[in-house]
Every structure is written in C-alpha cells, then in structure tokens.
Image (tube, rainbow, N blue to C red):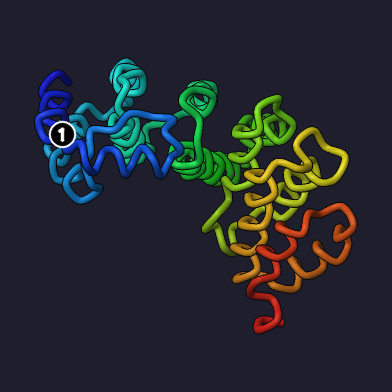
Amino acid sequence: MIDIVEQFRAHRDERIAEGQAAYLRHQFEFIGLKTPERRALQKEFLREKKLDAKVDWPTVWALWYLPEREFQYLALDYLRKMKKYLQASDLEKIKKLALSKSWWDTVDSLDELVGFLLLQERSQGLQENTNEKNVVNSTIRDWATAENFWVRRIAIDCQLGFKEKTDEVLLAFVIGQNLAGSTFEKEFFINKAIGWALRDFSKTDPRWVAHFIDNNRAQMSNLSIREGSKYLKSSI
C-alpha cells in the first residue's frame, strides 16, 4: 500500500488541491488529483488487490484514516470493486465509514454497497426459500432512525437505481421515519435524499411516487416534494 500512497502524493498539485478543498468547504485536505488522473494511478493497485478474492479491511481502514481525501476515494473505489465479497456482517464496518470523515462525497458512495447487500440477501432468500431473518433489510430499517443523519441518508438512498427491483414497503418505511416530527426533519441532506429517492423511483413507477407524495405532502419538506415531483408531470 505504501507504493500507492507515494504515487498519489508524488502528483501533488497545490492549485487544484485548494480548489477541491474549497468545494468541500475546507473540511478535508487534498493532494490535488483530478478524477481521471487518480483512476489511472490506482488502476494497477486495484487490479492486484482484486486478486485476493476477499475484502482487505485493514487496507480500507489504513486508506480511510490518511489525511488526504483522495485516499478515501480510493478506499471506496476498492470496495466497489470487491462488493461481491461483502457480507451482511460488513454492514457495521460500512456504518463506521459513514460516521468518519462524513460528507456527501463519501457517504453517497456507500449507498451502492448497502444496496448490493440488500439485493444479494433478497436473491438468496428467494433461492433458498428460507424464513430466516432478513439481516440487511432489518439493518436498513434500524438505520432509518439512527442518531446520525448520514446513516439515515444511506437507508433512504440505498435503493437508488433499483428500478423494478425497488422494495416499495422498505422505501416508504425509511422515508416515513424522516418526515415532519422526526429528529432530522429540517436537515437539508435528509430532505434532499428523500427527494432523490422518490425522483429516482418515479422513473419506474410514477403513480406510486405521486400517491406517496399526495398522502404525505403535509409532512414533507418543500425540497423533498420539489425533487420527488420533478418527472411526474410528464410521466403520469
């Protein structure tokens, strides 16, 4: 791992780094790597790590706690490459990532990992015809009322891109836990997440989304309604 750290830092560009830091409100340090350059530099590293055929969590943590933001992006790219090796037991590790160095640029990348585990659990359950507890589904429901709003955001948006595979019952539940009267009812990143989740599913089932908004309009923020309704007029 030392090599990839040295490679990244060898391409430091202070001018670009300053712009990147400003974009994220100076919350994080940057090396100054643009995305195409970073992906080119990490390509061989990811190829070699993928040969392990298992998730190397010590490497993930080592990257995550380095000061420059590009290393958190590398850790996330690595996890996406290795997502087929993730287990439901890794959800607590994913939650830990969401709680550390939290901002939308990393948290929103965790949606895909949780969503993958959800689909995997559902597929295995159907194949095995088992009545065992749905650990991932249950965890997402718990996250919908978490003390940290970034964790709630993952619960709300983890089904983005699911289309016809969306679990409407789960979607309605996680959103419902974050409407008026909830702990984070005025949190921008929660209300935006609700809007995105509804807007995304409206491309597949606009009538369901329109019905949900109509039934919950009094409890929803204007932001959530505006985002969630974006494609409805032309779809119904």
On-image quarter of the C terminus: bottom right
| Along the viewing direction, whichever of 32 and 91 lies nearer the viewer | 32
| Along the viewing direction, whichever of 30 and 40 lies nearer the viewer | 30
Q: Is residue 8 above or below residue 2?
A: below
Q: Secondary structure at mark 1?
A: loop
Q: Residue at x 23, y 39 (%)?
A: 32
- Looking at the picture, how far across and down is residue 116, in whole percent? 48, 43
Q: Residue at x 22, y 26 (%)?
A: 52
Crowding near the residue tagged with mark 1, few <14, some 14–19, many ≥20 C-alpha atoms within 10 Å: some
**Horizontal side of residue 33 vs 113, given as left or right:** left
Q: Residue at x 56, y 41 (%)?
A: 118
Q: Amino acid at mark 1?
A: Arg
Which residue is labeled 1 in the image? 12
On-image quarter of the N terminus: top left
**Horizontal side of residue 16 vs 215, given as left or right:** left
The reply to whether residue 56 is visible in this rendering is no
- Looking at the picture, how far across and down is residue 7, in whole percent? 10, 30
Q: Is residue 234 above or below residue 135?
A: below
- Looking at the picture, how far across and down is residue 104, in whole percent? 50, 41
Q: Residue at x 14, y 45 (%)?
A: 40
